[in-house]
Amino acid sequence: MEAEGLRSVSLRANRRGDRGNQSSSAKDAEGGFFSPGRLAHEYPMKVMFRMGFVRLVLVAGIVWMLLILSVLLFHVWSCQSSVAFVSAICNRESRVIKILDTMGIVPQPQQTQHRCPIPLANDPDGVAIPSGRTPDKIVANLHYVMDDEEINNSSKSPPLFGGRETWSQREESFKLNSTMKVHCGFIRNGGAEMDPIDIKYVKKCRFVVASGIFDGYDTPHQPSNISQQSKKLFCFLMVVDEKSLAFIKSNVTVRKDDDGGQWVGIWRLVLLKNSPYDEPRRNGKVPKILTHRLFPQTQYSIWIDGKMELIVDPLLMLERYLWRGKHTFAIAQHKHHRSIYEEADANKRRKRYARPLIDLHMKIYKYEGMQPWTPEQGNPSDVPEGAIIVREHTAINNLFSCLWFNEVDLFTPRDQLSFGYVVYRLGGAFKFFMFPNCEYNSIFVLHPHTREHSSKIEWVKNMSEFEGKGSVLKESRGGLGLWTPYPGNLNEVVLPPVARTSKAG
């Protein structure tokens, strides 16, 4: 019985299948969905439509991708362009550039080493120290203006540390003669007086490592890797103002010797009473640039900024940067900038001084013929890293230092803006060695300031802020050349375009 039931179910399924096949055949015969007529007319149209749509999408996609690629390539090219206008379009901080940079698509500028080995002599005891002084061939006798001139006979104003140098006196100071007399700070009763105890001490210093701390921004950092020969040979002099001396005494141990001298480790503290300027940055330029005036008996000096810890033996530095190449003045090349106009732009971006006064400073230099740096000039750069200066105190070097300081006194305290200009004005008479920036970074360890430096004048954006009650923003004893009528017409001066090579550098 079970077998017969299974056969009947199978027969019914077969009959249903046959009826389904017959039904499909009938529909085809009657012109169903897949009839020959429909395939001949409608199907080719659908295929053509679909193929055309796909091609349209593909063409549109290719065009869109080419457009995007063109925009990206222009963006990358603009960042590498030497054309100032095109380069200004580039935003190096954009998300696009950052993404492309991670993919390795953005061409990288030529990278320089941050630090590199300094080719120092092996043994300080084996260094041959020159017995005499480098002869003065251009300027034999250099004298300094010591008394300030009255503005007029009716009023007597306090003497200024830098003196009231006129535009004609400034112009004459660049004309080299065998005997010269120039402004060079230290006008009588102008400030920056040294204690008699310190004056007596520094008279015996022929070799000096000098540094300075002003307005309490740092504490002395002890040098390392100093040989016994250098400890015997060098005076380590830390120049401070009254505020910094009080700050140092409250934070580190200050030792007094039998003569009343004050010491922090190897550093002899040298107090300058009555700060000559309102602006601490400008006060710091006095010992930095006018080292030969503070320490007149010194023959060789190494200046290092107060925030730095010296880690190279100073005697080996003199051998490397002066004696080996028969140089008398050495300073490092700036890491980013070659032209003073690039450096001025970076100073404005970093708010290092009032922007309109920096522009005025640069317009004066441009009017007087200072061009942007080019390799044909012969010097590696017009912009130094001024935090380390190695020099022999020859007459031409002392004259250069005086003229450099006078520019800092007359204009902005940003001494890197003035260095190349004074080199230009001396017409090649001043010879110096500008050593690689990577060696400069190997000379010291950098320590942070105890607090951030800030002054009101650094945030000034336009001249109108100096008007009326804003006149309190002006420095009363420095930068006066920017407020004195200039003898030339600066209205037609256009500053050179700047291609920014660093974030602010």
Image (cartoon, helix red, strand yellow):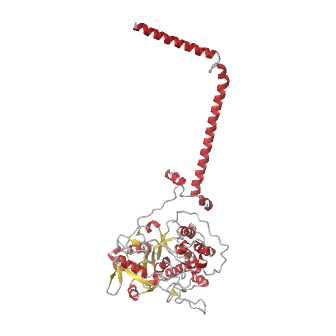
In the foreground, 150 or 501: 150
Does the image show residue 168?
yes
What residue is at 58 percent from the left and 51 percent from the top? 72
What residue is at 42 percent from the left and 7 percent from the top? 4
In the foreground, 478 or 326: 478
| Residue 346, quarter of the rendered image | bottom right
Determine whether, in the image, residue 218 is placed left or right of residue 353: left
| Residue 325, quarter of the rendered image | bottom left
Determine whether, in the image, residue 387 is placed left or right of residue 40: left
Q: Locate the N terminus and report the quarter of the image it occupies.
A: top left
Q: How many marks?
A: 0
User: Is residue 311 depicted above or below 471 in this figure?
Assistant: above
Does the image show residue 299?
no
Q: Position of residue 314 (x, y in %)?
A: 39, 74
Determine whether, in the image, residue 211 is placed left or right of residue 401: left
User: Is residue 7 depicted above or below 475 in this figure?
Assistant: above
